[in-house]
């Protein structure tokens, strides 16, 4: 076992306060939207139809989703924990605009560790004699906010002796982030267990009422910190996933909500009329959501897809090419984007991807502190994430909140990748 400190910036990074507030103000809207998508069978079916023909992983998730619906949902309490990520796009006149990169609906991480970064950056500023500036750093405690959502779902499940199960990776690289949330639950007298898919396969079972048991303990809430990339699954793990999804336990997220977070769904949301169809009667929320959208384009077979492929091949630096993957390091840029598109332009394979306008933020200077790396000033760009938490019981939303934020910063030479991918580091916003 090796323990390293999590990477972080030496200084907090400047964030425009208007954009920061805008990101917080739209979070409850995004919670509503994700929840609405997860309940809309037809929308998911239509939107993912082309993708699941060519992407086996999405297809497998979708099959489980359909199977669970056909059997009838045993779950009646729903818990969503997501993180909506943004960059500050620098317009031609130099004004920054808030643009969504993506929304993570499964295993959104770093809410725990980032609950500690304010203290780190406050201390650095004080060492520099900048007490006034240190006092302006905003408090931020997503681990508490996430735990309050989990605790609410646990309470509504209604079995005081049942536990919360964190579904964790085979090799646990980010355990301390998870422990921050776990500690908040123990503080509220809620028992937490940590299990892998393998444990569920070997020791998990459902009773007649589809209550989930593992090692003889009833599980009220399953909080996934695993299960979002193909390499998390072998045949046994898929069976374990199916067992969990069929159960009455509150899954965070259920498989429909995981599908709501795919890049393909994100692209379809940007089509005129889609938000209106998903959130009827929510004109103001729709306007707030839409204001954060960058240009997103389908590569489905047809005239529209042909046109976008040609545009991207002609000007690859305008775009990012994204497959249906999570976790960083999967997107294609520049020359590589052009080469891949040239190869698949006439093949249905291209429908596994979406195309997105590339966001171009104004770089700033910072030091990225990472174990075993030399210390040097770098030109950096930042990505702001807002954590969203909601709980629904039947048809009724009983909690809908923004639960804190995460700022990640990386050197501009890296086009892609988050903290877990070894590219970005933890940061704290300094609002101006
Ligand atoms: P993942 O699910 O792998 O996290 P993202 O959509 O978040 O996929 O992309 C990974 C990273 O790539 C982001 O953190 C960001 O640094 C970069 N990125 C993604 N989309 C864009 C974009 N439209 N413009 C500029 N950079 C982007
Ligand atoms: Mg991301």
Image (cartoon, helix red, strand yellow):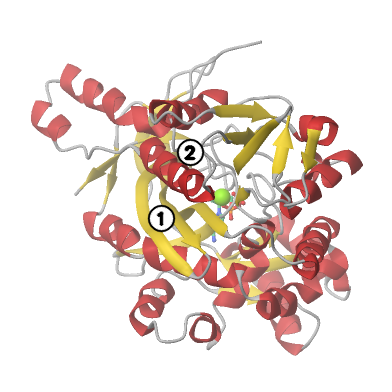
Q: Residue 217, relative to residue 42: is it above or below?
A: above
Task: Classify mark 2 as within 8 Å of ligand 1 or not, answering yes or no.
Answer: no
Quadrant including the N terminus:
top right
- Count of numbered circles in the view: 2
Q: Is residue 235 left or right of residue 244?
A: right
* Residue 8 image offset from top left, x and y in percent: 42, 28
The residue lying at 88 percent from left, 39 percent from top is 236
Q: Is residue 175 left or right of residue 17?
A: right
* Residue 233 image offset from top left, x and y in percent: 82, 42
Distance of label 1 from label 2 (alpha carbons): 12 Å
Q: Residue furthest front?
A: 208
Characterize the local packing of mark 1: few (<14), some (14-19) or many (20 or more) Cα atoms within 10 angstroms.
many
* Residue 198 found in image quarter: top right
* Residue 351 found in image quarter: bottom right
* Residue 411 image offset from top left, x and y in percent: 48, 38
Along the viewing direction, whichever of 40 and 311 lies nearer the viewer = 40
Q: Residue 86, relative to residue 306: is it above or below?
A: above
Along the viewing direction, whichever of 271 and 282 lies nearer the viewer = 282
The first of marks 1 and 2 along the sequence is 1
Residue 158, numbered label = none
Along the viewing direction, whichever of 209 and 385 lies nearer the viewer = 209
Q: Residue furthest left?
A: 132
Characterize the local packing of mark 2: few (<14), some (14-19) or many (20 or more) Cα atoms within 10 angstroms.
many
* Residue 6 image offset from top left, x and y in percent: 48, 23
Q: Residue furthest top?
A: 1
Residue 411, numbered label = 2
Q: Is residue 350 left or right of residue 271?
A: right
Residue 361, numbered label = 1
* Residue 130 found in image quarter: top left
Q: Secondary structure at mark 1?
A: loop
């Amino acid at each position: 076992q090796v323990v390293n400190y999590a990477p972080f910036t030496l200084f907090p990074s400047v964030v425009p306060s208007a954009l920061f507030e805008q990101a917080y103000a739209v979070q409850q809207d995004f919670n509503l939207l994700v929840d609405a998508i997860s309940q809309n069978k037809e929308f998911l079916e239509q939107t993912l139809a082309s993708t699941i023909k060519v992407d086996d992983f999405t297809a497998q998730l979708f099959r489980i989703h359909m199977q669970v619906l056909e059997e009838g949902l045993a779950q009646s309490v729903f818990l969503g924990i997501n993180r909506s990520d943004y960059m500050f796009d620098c317009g031609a006149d130099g004004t920054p605009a808030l643009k969504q990169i993506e929304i993570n609906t499964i295993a959104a991480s770093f809410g725990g560790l980032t609950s500690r970064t304010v203290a780190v950056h406050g201390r650095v500023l004080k060492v520099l004699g900048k007490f006034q500036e240190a006092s302006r750093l905003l408090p931020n405690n997503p681990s508490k906010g996430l735990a309050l959502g989990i605790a609410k779902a646990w309470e509504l499940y209604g079995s005081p002796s049942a536990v919360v199960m964190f579904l964790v990776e085979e090799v646990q690289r980010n355990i301390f982030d998870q422990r921050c949330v776990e500690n908040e639950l123990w503080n509220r007298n809620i028992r937490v267990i940590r299990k892998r898919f393998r444990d569920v396969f070997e020791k998990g079972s459902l009773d007649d009422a589809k209550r989930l048991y593992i090692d003889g303990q009833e599980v009220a809430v399953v909080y996934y910190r695993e299960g979002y990339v193909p390499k998390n699954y072998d045949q046994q793990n898929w069976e374990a996933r199916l067992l969990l999804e069929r159960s009455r336990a509150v899954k965070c997220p259920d498989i429909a909500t995981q599908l709501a977070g795919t890049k393909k769904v994100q692209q379809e949301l940007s089509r005129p009329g889609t938000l209106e169809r998903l959130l009827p009667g929510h004109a103001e929320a729709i306007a707030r959501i839409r204001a954060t959208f960058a240009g997103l384009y389908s590569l489905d077979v047809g005239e529209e897809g042909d046109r976008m492929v040609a545009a991207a091949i002609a000007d690859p630096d305008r775009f990012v090419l994204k497959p249906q993957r999570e976790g960083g390091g999967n997107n294609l840029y520049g020359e590589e984007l052009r080469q891949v598109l040239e190869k698949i332009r006439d093949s249905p394979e291209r429908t596994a991807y979406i195309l997105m306008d590339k966001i171009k933020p104004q770089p700033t200077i910072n030091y990225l502190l990472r174990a075993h790396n030399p210390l040097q000033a770098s030109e950096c760009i930042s990505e702001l994430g807002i954590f969203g938490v909601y709980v629904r019981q039947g048809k009724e939303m009983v909690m809908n909140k923004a639960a804190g934020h995460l700022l990640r910063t990386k050197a501009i030479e890296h086009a892609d990748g988050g903290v877990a991918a070894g590219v970005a580091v933890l940061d704290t916003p300094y609002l101006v």
